[in-house]
Amino acid sequence: KTISRWSVIERLEKQSGKQMLDSIITEKLIQNEAEQQGLAVTDEEVAAEIKTIETSVAAQGSTLEEALAGQGLAMEDFKKSLKLQKALEKLLSDKIKVTEEEINQSLGDKAGIPAGKEEEIRGQITDQLKSQKLNQEASKYIEELRAKVKIKYFVQY
């Protein structure tokens, strides 16, 4: 028997239609807000982030292409996702800054850090703290954006 494309679409909508719709709405809200604030993410910024990720993945003995394939992601979709993340970082830049005090607090006892590795570890901690702040602030920010707009739903999931 033939399985129609429509039956696949129906099942996908039932399983994850609401989640996908919310994701698309969030993406549009972030893009619109970045445009209104005159913030743009360049291809060079995305390429630089990809290089950083490639280096990190290579250190784990893999390639970015393998990692993306393992997650079922195409490179173009990954680039779009990075562009959106970079836009969000720019929108929240004042709220996700990491202070020296926060880094020192996370470092704790410096005696356990191997000689010559402090800068590398400080960089890793800075990235980790920034990522944590971004995750926390992004949720609040997206809720604020949603509250400012009127969203009309033509389909309920």
Image (tube, grey):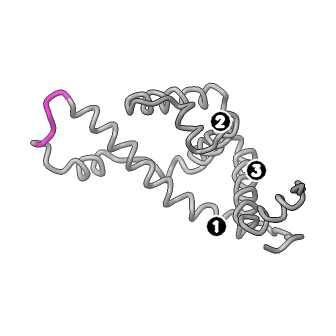
Please state which amino acid type lies under the numbered disc 1.
Answer: Glu
Mark 1 in CB contact with mark 3 (< 8 angstroms): no
Across and down, in percent, residue 17 comes to: 76, 65
Secondary structure under the numbered disc 1 in the rendered image: helix
In the rendered structure, which segment of residues is drawn in magenta? 112-116
- Queried whether the magenta region covers residue 113, the answer comes back as yes
Q: Is residue 113 left or right of residue 53?
A: left
Residue 37 badge: none
Would you say 14 lies left or right of 52 here? Answer: right
Return the disc, 1 or 3, that comes first in the chain's sequence.
Answer: 3
Closer to the chain start, of discs 3 and 2, is 3
Query: Number of callouts in the render?
Result: 3
| SS assignment for the magenta stretch, majority | loop
Helix, strand or loop under label 3: helix
Q: Which of pointers 1 and 2 lies earlier in the amino acid sequence?
A: 2
The residue located at (14%, 43%) in the rendering is: 110
- The answer for how far apart the CA atoms under marks 3 and 2 are is 18 Å
The structure residue drawn at horizontal position 53% and vertical position 31%, both measured from the top left corner, is 64
| Residue that label 1 marks | 143
Residue type at tag 2: Lys
Write the residue at 57% across / 65% down.
140
Dot 3 corresponds to which residue?
A: 32
Q: CA distance from mark 1 to mark 2?
A: 24 Å
Q: Residues within 10 Å of mark 1 (few under 14, many from 20)?
A: few
Tell me the element at label 2: helix
Instruction: Locate residue 24, reporting x and y percent.
Output: 75, 56
Q: Residue furthest bottom?
A: 156
